[in-house]
Image: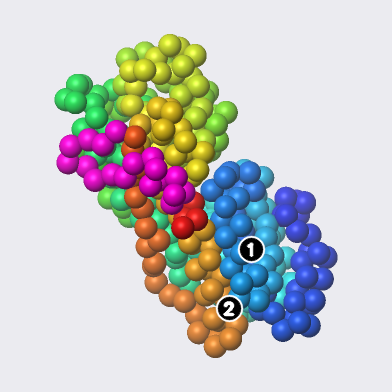
Amino acid sequence: MNKTFATLSLTALAFAASSAFAAGEPVIGLITKTETNPFFVKMKEGAQAEAKKLGAKLMSASGKKDGDTAAQITAIENMVTAGAKTILITSSGDAILPAVKKAQAKGVQVIALDSPFEGADALFATDNYKAGVLIGQYAKEALGGKPAKIAMLDLFPGHPVGAQRHNGFMSGFGLKANDAKSNELSSTPETVCAGDTDGNQAKGQTTMENCLQKDPGINVVYTINEPAAAGAYNALKKAGKEKGVIVVSVDGGCAGIADVGKGVIAATSQQYPLKMASMGVAAGVEYAKSGKKSSGYVDTGVTLIAANAVKGVDSKDVKVGTELCWGKK
């Protein structure tokens, strides 16, 4: 297992932990899927701010890309060795579960942020199915009764967040779809193309280019997140089709909201990673002080942001989206 993927080495983590305990600070770990996606960058910033506010020591690590469970496993092991008593994880997949169980057996509280996984003590996250439903409802109404030809730009197979957003979108659009508990991606005749993006812009563009080759008449594009949406838009623009296609997404980051204002994205479901992270750190501090673990699911909220409102679908405008992006207010 390659341990260089973790942001902090075992030695650095151990030193940080020993220094923290010497100062009486609770030690909390944060493991994100990547360190480049703006969503996770903001999550880390939120965790750092809350740790400073509450007098905790934060360790952080990430994978090289979405799906890099090997790096996340290494990070869990390193953080446990270094003395973290709470670890916050945005899971890249179920391969981390044995490492999570081993950590919990040693008294470590493990909290899922954004992405649910089996056995987590608690989950602080967006209702991702609802996020999908909102953009599905918007796209349906914005299409104005025209026959739908939909491209589905997904994350990768089997991930619960990807499945919930995908199936939620289809449900919101009025198509037959699996429920929020399913990790299987629904498909109907209206979904003329689907492909994985790993949540990044380059693969989003490539997948959209492939979809346009398969069916140049695509008029709705669902995207797993805003980097993938930016890639899809680049492909549409390159093909001269950017004006006639409705692109919807999830995240509501500051750059994504700016893209809504520019017409790159028609609507996006805004989520709040700063809130997830700050709640996770606060839960870690509480556990260190009282021994009381968090439990259950806490919905951190979702808001539909659109430049142009449509009938029957509640949304907020770009000004509100900008004020709220990443949960900064």
Locate residue 266, reporting x and y percent. 35, 31
Q: Earlier in the sequence, mark 2 or mark 1?
A: 1
Whether 265 is among the magenta residues is: no
Rendered image: mark on residue 285: 2
Label 2 environment density (alpha carbons within 10 Å; few <14, some 14–19, many ≥20):
many
Element class at badge 2: helix
**Tag 1: residue type?**
Gln
Q: Is residue 12 visible?
A: yes
Instruction: Please tell me which residue is depicted at 43% across the width and 51% down the height of the picture.
Output: 324
**Tag 2: residue type?**
Val
Locate residue 106, reporting x and y percent. 63, 79
Looking at this view, is 205 or 327 the one in front? 327
Q: Colour scheme of this structure image?
A: rainbow
Rendered image: mark on residue 118: none
Element class at badge 1: helix
Instruction: Please tell me which residue is depicted at 72% across the width and 50% down the height of the picture.
Output: 5
Q: Distance between the residues labelled 2 and 1?
A: 13 Å
Q: Give the range drawn in magenta.
A: 308-325
Looking at this view, is 281 or 106 the one in front? 281
Locate residue 251, reporting x and y percent. 45, 45
Q: In this view, does 297 lie above or below 244?
A: below
Label 2 close to label 1 by CB (< 8 Å): no
Q: Is residue 291 left or right of residue 311?
A: right
To which residue does mark 1 refer? 48
Whether 311 is among the magenta residues is: yes
Locate residue 63, reporting x and y percent. 65, 49
Q: In this view, does 166 lie above or below 114?
A: above
Instruction: Please tell me which residue is depicted at 48% across the width and 72% down the height of the picture.
Output: 121
Q: Can residue 164 be seen in this view?
A: no
Q: In this view, does 215 lie above or below 134?
A: above
Instruction: Please tell me which residue is depicted at 33% across the width and 26% down the height of the picture.
Output: 246
